[in-house]
Image (cartoon, rainbow, N blue to C red):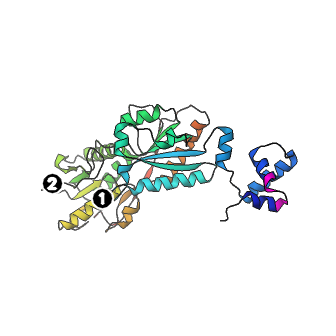
Amino acid sequence: MKNIRMKDIADVLNISTVTVSKALSGKEGVGEELRDKIKLTAEEMGYRYNSMAKGMKEGKSYNIGVLIAERYTLDDGDAFYLKIYQNIVKVLSNGEYYGIMELVTAEAENSKTIPNIISDKKVDGIIVLGQMKLNYLETIKNTNVPLVFLDFYEEKMDVDSIISDSFYGSFRLTNYIISKGHRNIGFVGNINSTSSILDRYLGYLKALITNRLVINEDWIIPDRGEDGAYIDFVLPEKMPSAFICNCDSVAYLLIKKLKKMGYNVPNDISVAGYDNDIFSSLSSPKLTTVEVDVEMMADTAIGAIMRKIQGDNRTIGRKVINGNIIIRESVK
């Protein structure tokens, strides 16, 4: 699609580019009738106002910042967060705002260094995508920039959060695996790492309890260290018949490890993931997983942060977005 310029508008109306610029920036020297005509033509042609010039006048940047911990992008990365960010940008593109991502290094997080997009006043609001350390989050909140958490919540902070229904989604997924005849089921994920992993573990746990199944601590396998970086799985000597992983990228890595150990998935051991991101289809076999409605999550987060930017101080608390089980070949 052609990028509409002020010159294009000027050519259509047979006027000067300077006149178009004055009309769109609200400067004097253009009659009201002509100003309205220029604005209408600009809108019909799909012209996007220069957000920098408009922002200087209104004291806004017309940018939304998205902070993501760098650890979520290392190694195989977290395709789920990239998918959410893409949807955030897509939602913003329908309006007059833009999205700016900044990766937060472990050093910056530990030293509580304020992100450049905040210190340089490049954004009107911040969406933190993915859990970070409490002290760092408090530092961000203390800047008084409108703030929303996405895909996690922090019990010790009063900040609006948009999350997937990790508890119920994992509960339903575990019940599905039980319905396929599995009685020995493990869980892969560091339950102390993020609120979403903990909720998925608790959903798994509830399914085992309600079905009166054995809870074996040896089958709870950490997938990452305290710094959030993936670690090699330490699998038990006696294996369960199925594993539920806290996300698809971990399920993908687990299947690769199981194959190296000589196991067939799903004939020997079934594996399920969570998120329905690109790893669910890259995996062989393709993953049974829980699809998170990333479009709804992004849309809800944008709606929440825009209301805060506009001065609406009402809170939504913790907004939960439902997901659906996607059945593929990785569970026998």
Badge number at residue 230:
none
Q: Amino acid at mark 1?
A: Ala
Q: Position of residue 29 (x, y in %)?
A: 84, 45
> Disc 2 to disc 1, how far (Cα)?
16 Å
| Image position of 284 with respect to 277: above or below | below
In the image, what residue occupies the spot 25% across and 65% down? 256
> Which structural element holds mark 2?
loop
> Which structural element holds mark 1?
helix
- Which span is picked out in magenta? 12-18
Q: How many marks?
A: 2
User: Which residue is more in the foreground, 82 or 216?
Assistant: 82
Residue 249 visible in the shown view: yes
Residue 329, by quadrant, is bottom left
In magenta segment, residue 16:
yes
Q: Quadrant of the N terminus?
A: bottom right
In the image, what residue occupies the spot 37% across and 62% down? 280
In magenta segment, residue 259:
no
Number of other residues with Cα within 10 Å of mark 1, as a class: few under 14, some 14 to 19, many 20 or more: many
User: Which residue is more in the foreground, 30 or 142?
Assistant: 30
Residue at numbered disc 1? 251
Q: Position of residue 57 (x, y in %)?
A: 69, 40
Q: Position of residue 249 (x, y in %)?
A: 33, 58
Q: Quadrant of the C terminus?
A: bottom left
| Image position of 96 with respect to 160: above or below | below
| Image position of 151 with respect to 234: above or below | above
Q: Position of residue 304 (x, y in %)?
A: 55, 40
Q: Amino acid at mark 2?
A: Pro
User: Which residue is more in the foreground, 258 or 157?
Assistant: 157
Residue 291 visible in the shown view: no
Badge number at residue 236:
2
